[in-house]
Amino acid sequence: MKQVKLTVKSNKMLTPTTYRMRLEGDVSAITQPGQFINLKLDGHFLRRPISVCDVESSHVTIIYKALGQGTEEMTHLESGTVLDVLTGLGTGFDSSRSGDAPVLIGGGVGIPPLYLLAKHLIREKKKVTVILGYNSEDEIYYAGEFAALGCEVKIATADGSVGIKGFVTDAYKELKRTLNDYTYFYTCGPTAMLKAIYRDVYTRGGVDGEFSFEERMGCGYGACMGCSVLLKTGGYKRICKDGPVLRAEEIYW
């Protein structure tokens, strides 16, 4: 973990509720896809944890959804604003376990951390398939960016306006024949989605994977123990420090 000052370079709307912010400064502590940063906002006691979408040189990109007062205020941060940020938080994805043909499954604000993971996997010459889930066409973002990396992209929308009608698990089931040779999977999204993937993909697919959890956090670096989750072994892990990525066989639902 590293506490730094980062400067807002851009803050743009991607969909009616989703925004992309690019920050400049010392981002050297961000070393794994799947890690997150924690932003301090004026007038708020708790920081806002946001997954890292991309990092390069002296810039980090985050994508966030305006869901509450804090994230709504973030939409108004202008270029040049300096933020107090904790960087390099959490344990991310392990790309070394991917095999030759990994599948990435993301929904909603669980999509952004998979982008940096996809970049790593493509650089490692892996054949990457990405399944992205949205509610409707007007909520779609970054599908083109994944395709530009060289990923095969499949889209599911709950209302059927684009791609496969239904959820990411429905897309997986429909594409199952063409994904028979996949070697590993990575996923991030709301808990209900992760549970469905655990049931429909992991327990029936016979292939291991990693789950990145979205959890309410207090401190964001393991001190308060507020985001601890029970493991199958009977022990606990802190989503903010030991996670947010957990191996499939560890998870106790």
Image (cartoon, rainbow, N blue to C red):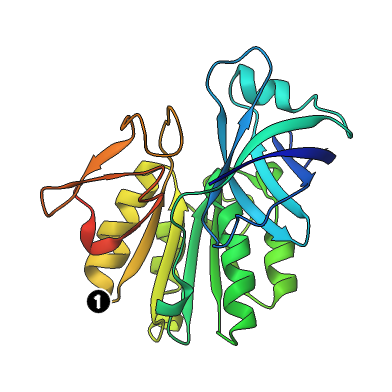
Q: Dividing the picture into quarters, in which one does residue 154 lie?
A: bottom right
Image spot of residue 90 (x, y percent): 46, 50
Q: Dividing the picture into quarters, in which one does residue 164 lie?
A: bottom right
Residue 152 visible in image:
no
Residue at the disc numbered 1: 206
Between residue 213 and residue 40, name the one nearer to us.
40
Image spot of residue 21 (x, y percent): 76, 42
Image spot of residue 225 (x, y percent): 31, 32
Residue at 41%, 81% (x, y): give it: 182
Q: Hey, what amino acid is under mark 1? A: Gly
242 to 42, vertically: above or below: below
* Horizontal side, residue 118 vs residue 96: left or right: right
Between residue 228 and residue 158, name the one nearer to us.
228
* Horizontal side, residue 58 vs residue 191: left or right: right
Q: Dividing the picture into quarters, in which one does residue 210 lie?
A: bottom left
* Horizontal side, residue 154 vs residue 150: left or right: left
Q: Which residue lies most toward the left here?
A: 234
45 to 152, vertically: above or below: above
Crowding at mark 1 (Cα within 10 Å: few <14, some 14-19, many 20+): few
Between residue 143 and residue 72, name the one nearer to us.
72
Between residue 194 and residue 85, name the one nearer to us.
85
Circle 1 SS class:
loop
Residue 1 visible in image:
yes
Residue at 61%, 52% (x, y): give it: 112
Residue at 30%, 49% (x, y): give it: 195
